[in-house]
Amino acid sequence: MTGRSLKAVIERLNLFVRGWKAYFRLAQTPSVWQALDEWMRHRLRAIQLKQWKTGRTISREMTARGASFDVASQVAANARRWWRNSAKLLNTALTIKWADRLGMPRLA
């Protein structure tokens, strides 16, 4: 999903998620819904890191979102490892509330 803003990605994602939720609403698999929620937030954080591109930008944006300087610099040091960074330390700055503010739907 390169070349798109997070808002555009989430708007497109909303169409599919609402459909999945409506189709599978009777299924009793809360762990599957929770795992899918976690994976979608993980993917959004990876997209956000990829859009920030450089370590300097990552550090600046993370400290602006409330992360400590140490955490921001650790993530910025591995600027090109989007998927790996989006699963660990980035959770302190880009939380579930961040995803909710962007309009990300929840399944669980």
Image: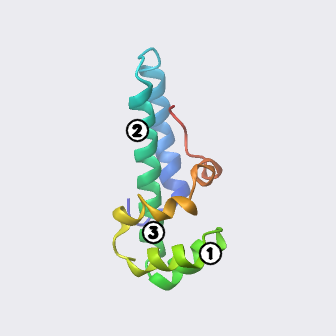
Q: Of marks 1 and 2, which one's residue comes earlier in the chain? A: 2
Residue 29 % position (x, y): 40, 22
Vertical comparison of 46 with 21: above or below = below
For residue 36, which numbered disc appears in the image? 2
Residue at position x 50%, y 31% in the image: 18
Q: CA distance from mark 2 to mark 3?
A: 20 Å
Question: Cβ–Cβ below 8 Å for labels 3 and 1?
Answer: no
Label 1, label 2: how many angstroms apart (C-alpha)? Answer: 28 Å
Instruction: Please tell me which residue is depicted at 45% across the width and 68% down the height of the picture.
Output: 49
Label 3 element class = helix
**Residue at image x 57%, y 54%?**
95
Q: Give left or right: position of 56 versus 23.
A: right
Of the numbered discs 3 and 1, the one sitting upstream in the chain is 3
Q: Residue 108 location in percent, x, y?
A: 51, 31
Q: Badge 1 is on which residue?
A: 63
On-image quarter of the N terminus: bottom left
Q: Residue 28, how many percent across, how many down?
A: 42, 17
Looking at the rendered structure, the kind of residue marked 1 is Thr
Secondary structure beneath dot 1 equals helix
Element assignment for label 2:
helix
Q: Earlier in the sequence, mark 2 or mark 3?
A: 2
Residue tagged by mark 3? 49
